[in-house]
């Protein structure tokens, strides 16, 4: 009996020790960087995992950015060899400007078997709900519940459960969500944001809805029209991740993700597009960008 208890204790300690081991995945590299796993040295690649006894070598003038256990992104920019054990302190969670959801998403893409990466990104974004008070013949996708607008082209779209051919788009001021300040009749199931610019003002909040002509829709979707100064302040906080370095393609893809998560649709589009232009061979960037355009009905 004592022998069984001893073996159980040894097994428990081994499990706890294993659970506490840090895992690292290569997120970004520049210059001469190599990985040593099982005493075999190979050129570092994006998505490479470091095992518990592994090491990473960074050459002069080079850098390697790693993600640790889904939570922490940091850069090794000083030349030398780093064992996994020596990186433990760098693996501590901190509150920097890198979106935690983005880090978890990239970690998942590199380390887990899954389906479509362009669809998986949505599960890492929290949707903020708007006012919804009834069920009717028009359905507006929850991803449009909240929109932060600065500039550019953003379609406001909806779907119909009937074969109706005429619709009405209504815009409301925050102070009165019952009386519209703008009514736009349309035969399409979308309206471009540019058609609202003569009515709305930067720095103010509005709500919108769409309905079959002659019917009502009590759903109200949130719009915040940001001033350029407000947006610049926000953008500067997310532009450069503290303690981590990236290539231009990676930076633009991250910013696209973070801006989409923050409901800046037009700005997210611009960064996703730039990421695909800077890294044309990156299938993840390309598939996410195509899915993004389809999701938001951007041509």
Image (cartoon, rainbow, N blue to C red):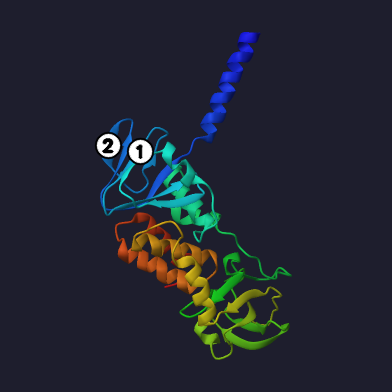
Mark 2 and mark 1 residues within 8 Å of each other at the beta carbon: no
**Which sits in the foreground, 195 or 270?**
270
Residue that protrudes farthest toward the bottom in the picture: 198
Helix, strand or loop status at disc 2:
strand
State the residue at coordinates (33%, 50%): 78
**Camera-side mark, 2 or 1:** 1
**Which sits in the foreground, 197 or 73?**
73
Residue 136, image quadrant: bottom right
State the residue at coordinates (26%, 51%): 60
Count the marks: how many? Answer: 2
State the residue at coordinates (33%, 52%): 63
**Residue 192 coordinates in the image, percent (x, y):** 50, 80
Q: Which mark is residue 72?
A: none
**Residue 138 coordinates in the image, percent (x, y):** 63, 71
Mark 2–mark 1 Cα distance, whole angstroms, equals 9 Å
Up-down: is 106 above or below 299? above
Up-down: is 25 above or below 39? below
For the C terminus, the image quarter is bottom left
Q: Is residue 127 left or right of residue 32?
A: right
Q: Which residue is mark 1?
A: 55
**Residue 261 seen anywhere in this rendered image of the structure:** yes
**Residue 59 coordinates in the image, percent (x, y):** 27, 48
Helix, strand or loop status at disc 1:
strand
Q: Is residue 234 left or right of residue 136?
A: left
State the residue at coordinates (60%, 14%): 6
- Mark 1: few, some, or many residues within 10 Å (few <14, many ≥20)? many
**Residue 81 coordinates in the image, percent (x, y):** 32, 41
Q: Which residue is mark 2?
A: 41
Up-down: is 29 above or below 220? above
């Amino acid at each position: 009996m004592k022998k069984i208890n001893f073996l159980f204790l040894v097994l428990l300690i081994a499990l706890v020790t294993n659970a506490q081991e840090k895992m690292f995945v290569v997120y970004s590299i520049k210059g001469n960087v190599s990985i040593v796993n099982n005493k075999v040295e190979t050129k570092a690649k994006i998505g490479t995992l470091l095992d518990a006894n592994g090491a990473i070598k960074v050459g002069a003038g080079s850098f390697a950015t790693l993600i640790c256990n889904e939570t922490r992104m940091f850069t090794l920019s000083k030349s030398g060899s780093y064992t996994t054990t020596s990186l433990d302190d760098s693996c501590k969670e901190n509150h920097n400007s890198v979106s935690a959801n983005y880090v978890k998403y990239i970690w998942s893409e590199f380390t887990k078997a899954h389906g479509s990466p362009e669809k998986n990104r949505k599960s890492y974004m929290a949707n903020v709900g708007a006012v919804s008070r009834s069920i009717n013949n028009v359905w507006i996708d929850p991803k449009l519940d909240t929109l932060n607008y600065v500039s550019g082209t953003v379609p406001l779209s909806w779907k119909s459960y009937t074969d109706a051919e005429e619709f009405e788009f209504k815009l409301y001021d925050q102070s009165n969500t019952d009386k519209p300040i703008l009514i736009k009749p349309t035969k399409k199931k979308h309206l471009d944001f540019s058609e609202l610019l003569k009515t709305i003002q930067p720095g103010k909040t509005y709500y919108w809805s769409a309905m079959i002509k002659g019917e009502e829709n009590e759903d109200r979707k949130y719009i915040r029209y940001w001033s350029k100064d407000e947006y610049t302040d926000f953008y500067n906080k997310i532009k450069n991740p503290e303690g981590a370095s990236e290539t231009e393609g990676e930076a633009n893809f991250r910013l696209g993700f973070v801006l989409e998560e923050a409901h800046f649709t037009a700005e997210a589009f611009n960064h996703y597009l730039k990421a695909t232009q800077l890294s044309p061979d990156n299938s993840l960037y390309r598939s996410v960008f195509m899915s993004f355009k389809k999701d938001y009905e951007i041509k």
